[in-house]
Amino acid sequence: MVENPSLGRKLFVAGNYIFMAFLAFLCLFPIIHVLAVSFSSSSAAAAGRVGLWPVEFTLKAYEFVVRKEEFTRSFGISLQRLVLGTVINMVMCVVIAYPLSKEARDFKMRTIYVWYFFLTVLFGGGLIPTYMTVKHTGLMDTVWALVLPGAVPVFNVILLLNFFRGLPRELEEAAFIDGAGHMRTLWSLFIPLSKPVLATVLLFTMVGHWNAWFDGLIYMNDPTNYPLQSYLQTVVIQQDLSAMSDSDVEMMKQLSSKTVKSAQIFLGALPILAVYPFLQRFFVKGIVLGSVKG
């Protein structure tokens, strides 16, 4: 028999819905506002007349950012970096975190290796030694200069390591009894049970690679090799007019810095906004609860 909820319960549920709707609005408002500004005229944006809807709709800001050959080339470089960097980071995180999640009796050198990786979080080599390493290994002006120096994100390794250690050991022992080796256990047991943390690490990795711009300025001597964020930072933020044609300069005179920056922000965030809905469903806890009985 199901009892009708009391008035207090109904008010509590209604209050929760209103509060969550308010939080959702606070999260969405900046994105919608930036999108509206990017589609508005320069005069409307400069006067602060744009709210949640474009004023004097125009695509000039996007035309300026997108139509250039440099933009499409840098966009392709960013996509290449995103794919290579994400694959390398995820593989390295998994293959490092799995053995380090074992007990000391199963992996005698575990503590030494854990401290070896953890010390890199506390102490870094610095910008100059890293630059010299990249330069003397011949990686300058290549996409590998953007990928290999951060191939092992230790913070993500620690997240994955701790999650692996929290999985029931009875499942691993059962897999070994059935004849599975370490690679089969990792692929068929640990990875399927670790979808929440893997999705989180994947999102962190993708956002980090896509938003990175400083390493592109450092390791790329030729501006034609800039990734997207480095290109946008140089051309749009610094307003480097030397690399622009006469038509580009005339168009910049008709644009507001607000509209151009808003277009840059939205285009830079669009790929992550498109990927996030497919990953957020894995952000759950307790996926292994009840997997071991008794």
Image (cartoon, rainbow, N blue to C red):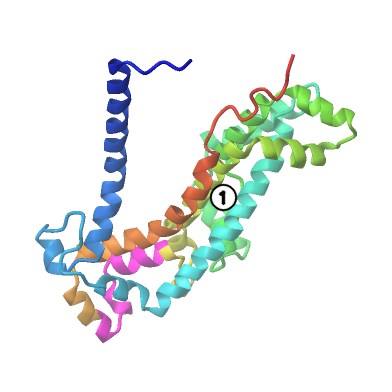
Residue placed at 50% from the left, 70% from the top?
76
Q: Residue 36, located in which quarter of the rendered image?
A: bottom left
Q: Main secondary structure of the magenta part?
A: helix
Residue placed at 27% from the left, 54% from the top?
32
Q: Secondary structure at mark 1?
A: helix
Q: Quadrant of the C terminus?
A: top right
Q: Position of residue 223 (x, y in %)?
A: 43, 72
Task: Check the image and report above or below for 11 versus 18.
Answer: above
Q: Is residue 242 left or right of residue 210?
A: left
In the image, which residues are magenta?
A: 229-248
Residue placed at 27% from the left, 32% from the top?
18
Closer-to-camera residue (83/115) = 83
Q: Position of residue 172 (x, y in %)?
A: 78, 28
Task: Check the image and report above or below for 175 versus 211.
Answer: above
The residue labelled by disc 1 is 150
Closer-to-camera residue (29/86) = 29
Q: Position of residue 65 (x, y in %)?
A: 33, 72
Residue at the far front in the pictured view: 1
Closer-to-camera residue (75/19) = 19
Tell me, yes or no, if residue 198 can be seen here. Answer: yes
